[in-house]
Image (spheres, rainbow, N blue to C red):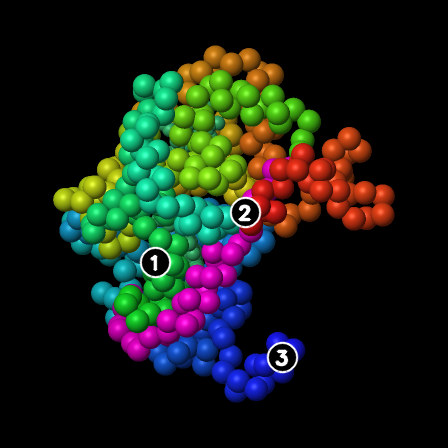
Amino acid sequence: MILLLSLALGTHEEPDGAELFARQWVEADPRSAGGDGLGPTYNDSSCTACHNQGGAGGAGPAAKNVRLTVRGGATVVLHRRHLAGIPEDERRMRPASLPIRMQPPVERNTPALFGMGLLDAIPESELLVAEALGSPGHPEISGRLARDPHGRVGRFGWKGQTPTLAAFVEQACSNELGLQTETTDQPGAPSLPDMDDPMLFALAGFVADLPAPVEVPTPGAERGREVFVELGCEGCHRASIGGVQGAYTDLMLHDMGFQLSDAASGYGLRAKAADTGASEAEWRTPPLWGLRDSAPWLHDGRATTIREVVLHHDGEAAPARRAWARAGEADQQALETFLMSLAAPGTPLPEPRLAETPVQTDGTLDPDGLDTLRLLASVR
Ligand code: HEC
Ligand code: HEC
């Protein structure tokens, strides 16, 4: 029926967001809406090249980290690749050849995009209320929402630099792949748009519809969840924000101390400057859902174990770190078990155990069992 309808309505085809997300772009790509395809400077040739752990849209390894530096107060991307014949000054690639007034490069690790649509849909008013209420019971924690230069609340990116998912997707086309859009330049020589608005809409729709991560029932995880609360982790990594369950973030900026500091912010944005973007020490609390599949962790992927992650927590999170250090080995282990039960969606669940399995003997799902498992993906 749908097929007949679309035949009757003509040959117009909607762009396919999944295809655009996985597409390996090339120079002068015929898929381009009218531009020059990949590049001229870029970091990789597809979204999935970086976002792939635990499925399309997942996190990425440290080898795919994006390198940034601050030039004249603004954050610029140091692209890893360029097409042949690009003049040196447009490449922005080799830190050694950069002017002295640039700071040494810093890195950003690729986060997972699962469930981002849910965070995008939280009304701004709910975040403002959460900001005003603060973290009851945690006087040491003083989160605040990031603001972009137009005063809009930022909720995406390690520095909370971008207000909406659609805006981040558009910037990613330009910054990571060198795909020009109607409103964003590509790095290097300008071209006509590679991604027209219908293509961008489809790509952003695909990202927004990526299912949320799941919690895999694991023995010991429930005790770990209690430890997580007892140590004060939940003061920032909140189980519930704006009606979204299980993301473990407050989407706010927190001062994390000197060791984690760096001056780079959103690409093209000034760090701190006149707006109220993140300061050097401030980072947006990353959602912990899907954590099992998103290593390495922290903004530059410097941590490969939970122990390292926690030991890097300083500033507003120093009391939580100290509480962790005082906790016994059993509680530290339970905490880790809980964190490792937060998995990307679509990754195979371990062999179900009888008491908790939602799969009945005839292979169908038991709705009550599903509730018990809190399969967050099914909330959508
Ligand atoms: C070279 C690796 C790389 C490629 C290619 C890449 N990304 Fe990313 N992505 C990153 C990194 C690194 C970040 C974190 C950037 C930051 O916050 O400064 C990120 C962040 C994001 C975010 C924000 C996530 C959050 O937690 O706030 C979205 C959305 C996103 N990317 C979408 C895309 C899309 C869509 C594409 C393809 C057009 C793409 N990315 C291509 C590395 C990559
Ligand atoms: C004051 C707020 C705050 C508290 C309290 C806090 N965190 Fe964090 N956490 C953050 C921020 C901000 C980051 C990101 C820092 C960075 O990347 O530089 C982070 C990062 C993490 C990460 C890495 C996530 C990723 O995707 O890379 C994990 C895991 C984590 N925290 C677990 C914990 C645990 C466990 C506790 C309790 C012992 C805790 N946090 C307490 C704010 C907090």
Q: Identity of the amino acid at label 2?
A: Ala
Viewer-side residue, 113 vs 68 = 113
Sequence-earlier tag: 3 or 1: 3
Sequence-earlier tag: 1 or 2: 1
What residue does disc 1 label? 167
Q: Are the two marked residues, 3 and 1, in contact with CB atoms closer than 8 angstroms?
A: no
In terms of image quarters, where does ligand 1 lie? Answer: bottom left
Q: Identity of the amino acid at label 3?
A: Leu
How far apart marks 3 and 1 lie (CA) works out to 32 Å
Within 8 Å of ligand 1, the CB of disc 1?
A: no
Q: Quadrant of the N terminus?
A: bottom right
Badge 2: residue crowd in 10 Å (few <14, some 14–19, many ≥20) = many
What residue does disc 2 label? 212
Q: Identity of the amino acid at label 1?
A: Ala
- Tell me which segment is drawn in magenta: 187-216
Question: Image point 31% across, 59% down: which residue?
Answer: 93
Please tell me whether mark 3 or mark 1 is closer to you in this view: 3
Question: Is label 3 in a helix, a strand or a loop?
Answer: helix
What residue does disc 3 label? 3
Question: Image point 62% across, 79% down: which residue?
Answer: 3
Camera sees residue 299: yes
The answer to if 204 sits in the magenta stretch is yes
